[in-house]
């Protein structure tokens, strides 16, 4: 607990360390004489380190540490800001400011690595399959994935911290605390702790503090030690309760916490009410949009004969290449606005257009085509369009990427309306953008006070160090972290049964107990699928098999005990009669909700990345082919088509034109599909290719008929038989009825054996209607319903819906 | 332009001084003093803006020594150019008009005669200046100033421009520079190591300087390469032309002791080379706000300006820094180099191409800079990497 006494400027605290005027000076001095308390704010773009000290009046404070970082000339620079970037440059590993400056010269994922924080907790195999620093490369340094990068970065940071502390003669017994986004999931926290420990920094669960909480501590410390002119602080010292939003908008994430802060008998108590769900939205999104919408077209002008970028090239190479320039243009434009005191999107609309020019993008090659951008430009009015979805009018169901969305989410979880908020504290580098602050303030009621610390980028680090002091010196956890999502059990009918409510403090004091029942007599297996937030974000499934041959009895109770560790790892214990099963859950694949198809894709991508890492540009075509096939199975048809094209490029003897044609068609890219249909036909006019090409000539019956006949002459291709039959039938050509009857003959056995496909059945129904074969029509219709029923069920569920339990409270609806 | 700091972002001490200046009502002339980079010009400009807002009917003029500084002050977004006049002191005297308020910058570069004339044309005057940075005149002293006007000194205690490393370099070049007690470095940029580059020969030196100046230059943060005289400026530019595959640029024309750089600048513009001479009435400071530019300047023209990346080549042992080097006044070399190195906000590159560097550089302790050796093969080819 943080305390402020009623006399503003004089602080007493029952935690005894966040004080202005303390009665245990000797104790505090003793602790600081023996130990150094370091706080690290590990940001997506920038890392800041602070230490706890005392000021001239013996008040506890925290200040940033200037850390040495290598420069690109072989020397050093020092700065309190350390960019979270690693660069491999002329045989040397750089980190920090000059590594960041090299982003435009080097290749992301190959010899420069940034935003690796955002890739923690996701298992897609090697995050950097094209890295120069692979295990097999013979270098001492290996960076193949986000964990390697994080660990290495912390190692270098640690060395720099130790050096800085030594130079300033701080005690060499060091305690660390690290800040994390409040919405960081258990798998992300676990990854981070593992990497930090791997870097040689001693750390444990309690050393982590949620970033918004750290920012709050820093703000309260500043209020205690300086003359902060704030109605929020005045209200507190006058004894009123306050609801505070902490809005942390960084490069990669947007984290919102709502805290309740109040006085209770001279002690100030702060409590987390809610945190927003993990939102991968930050300044980087603006940059990526500028790169994609503004700079890519400019880049393409430098290579007019180049067709277009495929998705993988665009997302994994081109956009990262252009992003530093996009960021630079954004910063120039915002500075221009700030100098003119323009701080809202509305006002921006009234300003005449302005053109900003960035630094050139060094030339590079992509598949033998050279690209360059000597004068990248950005118009002010184009920037308005870029900002609009994020900063414009907010419509909750429509503008999902709006920066207010996480605030909305947190308010709902806290059960508060915006008018019940007293103040909002802005932190994070991207909050420096005045348009961001105005966009939020315009939505909130005018009664909400805007709090902006002096240095938005160092604020969290300062609070983290203070937390570290409280935790390591006194075992005190200032503000208990809470969960950002509800943890639920999926029950019969896809209803959700809440196991752990949202905004639960962690670690949980005691387990939450939920009781469900067996829904069917004799059920032999119970499956308990656990999800977070909603049904698509499956954490895991607990199976319990009955030890009795007759299965479980109807209405038998299934008791589930759920608890959370400090790291938000979920522990589940399930009990049916005497059968118990314990398990711990993390979701290794992703930090956001995934559909079954997306899960498949991620698994496929992991395999592909592993192969890419191993083989580099000489990756065997079999891996690419496999990836293409899995993409197609997962429904990412556009990617599948592009990957099949890549296989053909690797091996010109491969003919995958039919696959390419099919996948482009499924992706809705008709022009490309038609193009490949022609190619496939020219290469091999087999039945399938004739059929595919015939689809291109829907409006030219002569050519279409010719192709369909050619198709049927080569193979009994049922869709062709159907189409030609219908075409001729409609023309009153007798041959039409013959062909349609032939179709019926060909599918009859399939119908009887229930092996007929959905499309075949649909065609059969149409023919039966035309030829008035009513009995057959009835059978076909029945069969079609059965097929629909089976296909409706998810093919990719990890559990059988028949094995689910039922909610005891049948009136409770799932989300 | 990067030099401008909004009112909201001034430090507490700056705000305090500004208020003191606004409320100053004695007959003494306010003299804003401070080490290079303490924001004298910035505060004087803020004062100008506030006085104009408080007294809209009064006539106000800002005067300074060089055209570059005039252009710099004009870039302030808070200045209403229809109400405030900004000009060189030469033009001010020529105009012969009396103003209610006059802000006089760089007072150390005046002489008694000019100061007297300026005083006559001003009802109320505010001055800034630092005698450690006197590079134009040698006969005007502090005593000369105080003989003419009674001053009240306002000392600035915070250095915003220089990093600690650059400050150390500056002090070692000019150990007798006035450092007020309590002077703090408040620069929030990275404290980059100053680089001392020894090149195998002048061609290599120029090639390296041009490549790195361009590489480090960004819109809003241009690089500047400083030279002591026009001859060396031209020699360097020939090197750039050669590297760019061009014929030599037109030589600046000399007219009444001044060089004309119009054709020179036009040449680079037409050939899409991001080089520009800045000084006198040539070149455009604002252009670098929106695009990548490398400026060539003389030490003299750079006075009062600052840049993130400053390159100072030709620091050979056998060259003088001042074109008017006078054995009787060795301070001019010191002051010039002092002014040159204090133009940098973050990155400073000193270079030479002889076996030994200039005496003033060799006086700098070794641990104040990083040494880089550039031989004939320094340029590594950057491979264009083919993607998968």
Image (cartoon, helix red, strand yellow):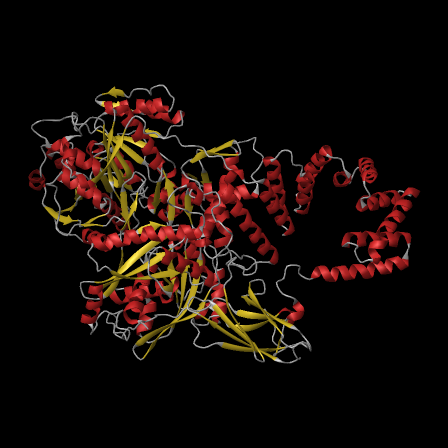
Image height of A122 relative to A620, above or below: below
* Residue B342, image quadrant: top left
Position of B258 with respect to A514 (left or right) is left
| Quarter of the picture holding the C terminus of chain A | bottom right
Position of A640 with respect to A721 (left or right) is left
Q: Where is residue B62 in the image (x, y as percent from the top left)?
A: 23, 40
Tell which of B141 and A376 is nearer to you: A376
User: Can you see residue B110?
Assistant: no
Please give the count of numbered marks on the rendered protein. Answer: 0
| Quarter of the picture holding the N terminus of chain A | bottom left
User: Can you see residue A756?
Assistant: yes
Image height of B98 relative to A806, above or below: above
Image height of B317 relative to A157, above or below: above
Q: Where is residue B303 in the image (x, y as percent from the top left)?
A: 22, 36
Q: Where is residue A597 in the image (x, y as percent from the top left)?
A: 61, 55
Image height of A684 relative to A567, above or below: above
Tell which of A701 and A598 is nearer to you: A598
- Residue shown at the point (22%, 26%) measured from the top left: B229
Tell which of B355 and A553 is nearer to you: A553
* Residue A19, image quadrant: bottom left
- Residue shown at the point (34%, 56%) measured from the top left: A456
Residue extending farthest to the right is A734
Q: Where is residue A277 in the image (x, y as percent from the top left)?
A: 49, 63
Position of A449 with respect to B17 (left or right) is right
Position of B29 with respect to A373 (left or right) is left
């Amino acid at each position: 607990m943080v305390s402020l006494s009623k006399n503003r400027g004089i602080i007493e605290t029952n935690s005894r360390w966040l004080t202005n005027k303390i009665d245990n000076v000797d104790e505090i001095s003793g602790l600081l004489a023996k130990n150094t308390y370091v706080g690290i704010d590990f940001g997506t773009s920038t890392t800041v380190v602070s230490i706890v000290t005392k000021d001239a009046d013996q008040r506890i404070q925290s200040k940033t540490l200037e850390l040495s970082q290598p420069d690109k000339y072989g020397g050093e620079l020092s700065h309190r800001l350390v960019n979270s970037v690693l660069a491999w440059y002329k045989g040397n590993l750089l980190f920090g400011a000059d590594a960041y400056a090299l982003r435009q010269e080097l290749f992301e994922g190959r010899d420069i690595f940034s935003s690796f924080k955002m890739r923690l907790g996701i298992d897609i195999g090697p995050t950097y399959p094209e890295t120069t620093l692979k295990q097999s490369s013979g270098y001492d340094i290996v960076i193949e994935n986000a964990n390697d990068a994080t660990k290495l970065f912390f190692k270098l940071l640690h060395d720099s911290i130790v050096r800085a502390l030594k130079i300033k003669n701080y005690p060499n017994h060091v305690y660390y605390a690290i800040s994390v986004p409040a919405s960081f999931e258990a798998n992300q926290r676990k990854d981070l702790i593992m990497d930090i420990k791997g870097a040689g920094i001693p750390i444990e669960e309690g050393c982590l503090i949620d970033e918004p909480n750290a920012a709050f501590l820093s703000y309260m410390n500043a209020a205690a030690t300086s003359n902060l002119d704030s109605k929020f602080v005045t209200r507190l010292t006058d004894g009123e309760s306050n609801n505070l939003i902490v809005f942390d908008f960084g490069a990669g994430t947007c984290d919102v916490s709502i805290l309740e802060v109040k006085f209770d008998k001279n002690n100030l108590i702060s409590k987390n009410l809610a945190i927003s769900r993990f939102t991968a939205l930050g300044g980087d999104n603006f940059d990526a949009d500028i790169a994609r919408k503004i700079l890519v077209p400019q880049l393409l002008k430098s290579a007019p004969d180049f067709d277009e970028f495929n998705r993988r090239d665009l997302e994994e190479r081109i956009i990262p290449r252009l992003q530093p320039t996009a960021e630079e243009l954004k910063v120039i434009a915002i500075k221009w606005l700030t100098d003119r005191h323009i701080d809202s999107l509305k006002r921006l609309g009234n300003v005449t257009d302005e053109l900003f020019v960035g630094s050139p993008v060094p030339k590079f090659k992509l598949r033998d085509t050279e690209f360059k951008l000597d004068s990248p430009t950005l118009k002010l009015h184009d920037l308005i369009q870029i900002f609009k979805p994020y900063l414009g009018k907010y419509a909750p169901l429509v503008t999902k990427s709006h920066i207010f969305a996480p605030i909305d989410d947190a308010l709902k979880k806290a059960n508060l309306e915006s008018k019940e908020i007293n103040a909002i504290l802005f932190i994070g580098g991207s909050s420096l953008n005045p348009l961001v602050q105005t966009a939020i303030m315009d939505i909130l009621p005018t009664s909400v006070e805007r709090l902006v610390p002096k240095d938005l980028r160092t604020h969290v680090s300062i609070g983290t160090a203070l937390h570290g002091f409280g935790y390591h010196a006194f075992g005190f956890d200032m503000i208990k972290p809470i969960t950002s999502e509800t943890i639920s059990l999926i029950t019969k009918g896809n209803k959700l049964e809440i196991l752990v409510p949202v905004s639960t403090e962690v670690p949980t004091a005691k387990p939450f107990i939920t009781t469900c029942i067996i829904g069917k007599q004799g059920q032999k297996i119970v499956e308990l699928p656990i999800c977070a937030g909603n049904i698509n974000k499956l954490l895991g499934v607990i199976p319990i098999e009955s030890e009795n041959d007759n299965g479980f009895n109807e209405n038998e109770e299934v008791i589930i005990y759920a608890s959370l560790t400090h790291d938000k790892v979920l522990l589940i214990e399930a009990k049916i009669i005497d059968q118990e099963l314990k398990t711990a859950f993390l979701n290794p694949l992703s930090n956001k909700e995934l559909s079954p198809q997306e899960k498949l894709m991620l698994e496929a991508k992991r395999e592909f990345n592993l192969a890419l890492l191993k083989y580099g540009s000489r990756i065997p075509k079999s891996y690419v082919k496999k990836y293409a096939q899995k993409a197609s199975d997962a429904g990412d048809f556009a990617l599948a088509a592009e990957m099949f094209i890549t296989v053909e490029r690797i091996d010109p003897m491969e003919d995958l034109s039919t696959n390419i044609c099919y996948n482009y068609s499924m992706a809705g890219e008709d022009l490309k599909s038609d193009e490949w249909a022609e190619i496939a036909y020219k290469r091999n006019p087999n039945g399938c290719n004739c059929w595919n090409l015939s689809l291109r000539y829907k409006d030219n019956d002569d050519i279409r008929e010719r192709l369909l006949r050619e198709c049927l002459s080569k193979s009994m291709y049922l869709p062709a038989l159907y189409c030609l039959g219908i075409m001729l039938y409609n023309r009153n050509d007798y041959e039409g009825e013959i062909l349609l009857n032939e179709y019926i003959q060909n599918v009859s056995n399939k119908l009887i054996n229930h092996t007929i496909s959905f499309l075949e059945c649909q065609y059969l129904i149409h023919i039966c209607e035309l030829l008035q074969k009513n009995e057959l029509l009835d059978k076909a219709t029945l069969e079609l319903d059965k097929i629909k029923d089976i296909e409706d069920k998810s093919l990719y569920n990890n559990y059988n819906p028949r094995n689910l339990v039922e909610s005891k409270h049948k009136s409770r609806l799932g989300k | 332009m990067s030099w401008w700091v909004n009112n909201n972002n001034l430090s507490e001490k700056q705000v305090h001084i500004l208020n003191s200046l606004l409320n100053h009502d004695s007959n003494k002339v306010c003299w804003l003093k401070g080490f290079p980079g303490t924001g004298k010009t910035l505060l004087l400009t803020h004062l100008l803006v506030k006085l104009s807002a408080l007294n809209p009917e009064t006539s106000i003029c800002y005067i300074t020594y060089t055209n570059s500084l005039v252009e710099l002050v004009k870039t302030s977004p808070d200045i209403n150019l229809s109400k405030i006049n900004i000009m060189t002191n030469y033009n001010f005297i020529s105009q012969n008009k009396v103003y209610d308020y006059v802000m006089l910058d760089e007072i150390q570069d005046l002489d008694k005669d000019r100061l007297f004339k300026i005083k006559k044309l001003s009802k109320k005057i505010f001055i800034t200046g630092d005698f450690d940075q006197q590079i134009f005149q040698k006969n005007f002293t502090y005593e000369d100033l105080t003989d003419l006007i009674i001053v009240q000194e306002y000392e600035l205690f915070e250095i915003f421009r220089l990093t600690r490393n650059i400050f150390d370099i500056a002090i070692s070049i000019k150990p007798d520079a006035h450092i007020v007690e309590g002077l703090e470095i408040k620069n929030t940029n990275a404290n980059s190591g100053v680089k001392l580059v020894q090149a195998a020969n002048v061609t290599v030196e120029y090639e390296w300087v041009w490549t790195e100046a361009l590489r480090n230059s960004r819109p809003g943060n241009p690089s500047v390469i400083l030279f002591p005289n026009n001859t060396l400026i031209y020699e360097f530019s020939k090197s750039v032309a050669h590297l760019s595959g061009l014929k030599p640029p037109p030589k600046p024309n000399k007219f009444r002791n001044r060089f004309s750089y119009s054709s020179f600048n036009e040449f680079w513009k037409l050939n899409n080379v991001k080089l520009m001479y800045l000084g006198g009435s040539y070149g455009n400071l604002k252009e670098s706000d929106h695009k990548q530019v490398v400026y060539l300047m003389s030490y003299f023209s750079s006075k009062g300006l600052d840049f993130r990346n400053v390159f100072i080549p030709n620091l050979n042992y056998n060259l003088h820094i001042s074109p008017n080097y006078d054995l009787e006044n060795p301070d001019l070399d010191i002051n010039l180099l002092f002014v040159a190195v204090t133009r940098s906000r973050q990155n400073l590159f000193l270079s030479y191409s002889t076996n030994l560097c200039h005496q003033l550089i060799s006086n700098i302790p070794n641990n104040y800079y990083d040494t880089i050796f550039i031989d004939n093969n320094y340029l590594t080819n950057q491979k264009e990497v083919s993607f998968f």
